[in-house]
Amino acid sequence: MAARFLANLLVMSSGILARAFVQAYRQALANASKSGVAQETLQNAVRRGSKVMTEQEARQILGITEGTSWEEVLKKYDTLFERNAKNGSFYLQSKVHRAKECLEASYQVKDPGNPS
């Protein structure tokens, strides 16, 4: 009889604790949305996910050096872009495209009339 009483007590208390936990979690979400914490967390996650490519990384992807001319960059880009288009690697193709975009911005700073 004591075992049955303890089992009932355990089941009832775990149910009460589960309901309290769910209610506290809902209240925490409501408080976070009121104070803007949820929106800030979401924006920080988006910022971390969209990491900007550095010039050094872009040069490594295209396999060029700092002294490479813009025409050579375009040749290398076309070659790598087409090669990845044929083999079906969209991820690598997008990396090559982002590398060109990154370098295009730096070449425009160096020589505003050159990249087109």
Image: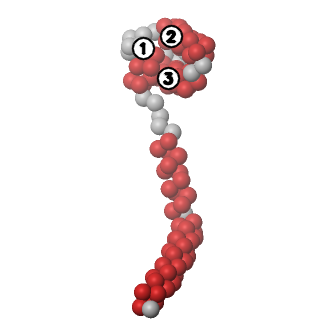
Nearer-the-camera pick, 52 or 4? 4
Residue 55 appears in the rendering: yes
Element under disc 3? helix
Is the C-beta separation of discs 3 and 2 under 8 Å?
no
Name the outermost residue toward the bottom. 1
Badge 3: few (under 14), some or many (20 or more) residues near its Cα, within 10 Å? many
- Which numbered disc flags the more N-terminal residue, 3 or 2? 2
Tag 3 residue: 99
Q: Residue at x 45, y 23 (%)?
A: 58
Q: Residue at x 54, y 9 (%)?
A: 79
Tell me the amino acid under the disc marked 2. Lys
Tell me the amino acid under the disc marked 1. Gly
Kindly identify which numbered label has been placed on residue 63.
1
Q: Is residue 109 above or below residue 25?
A: above
Element under disc 2? helix
Nearer-the-camera pick, 11 or 51? 11
Nearer-the-camera pick, 47 or 22? 22
Where is residue 25 shown, x and y percent of the image?
A: 52, 71
Badge 2: few (under 14), some or many (20 or more) residues near its Cα, within 10 Å? some
Q: Residue at x 38, y 15 (%)?
A: 66
Q: Quadrant of the N terminus?
A: bottom left
Tag 2 residue: 76
Where is residue 96 shown, x and y percent of the image?
A: 52, 21
Q: Is residue 26 above or below residue 12?
A: above
Q: Is residue 37 above or below residue 63?
A: below
Gap in angstroms between the C-alphas marked 3 and 2: 11 Å
Is the C-beta separation of discs 1 and 2 under 8 Å?
yes
Nearer-the-camera pick, 104 or 29? 29
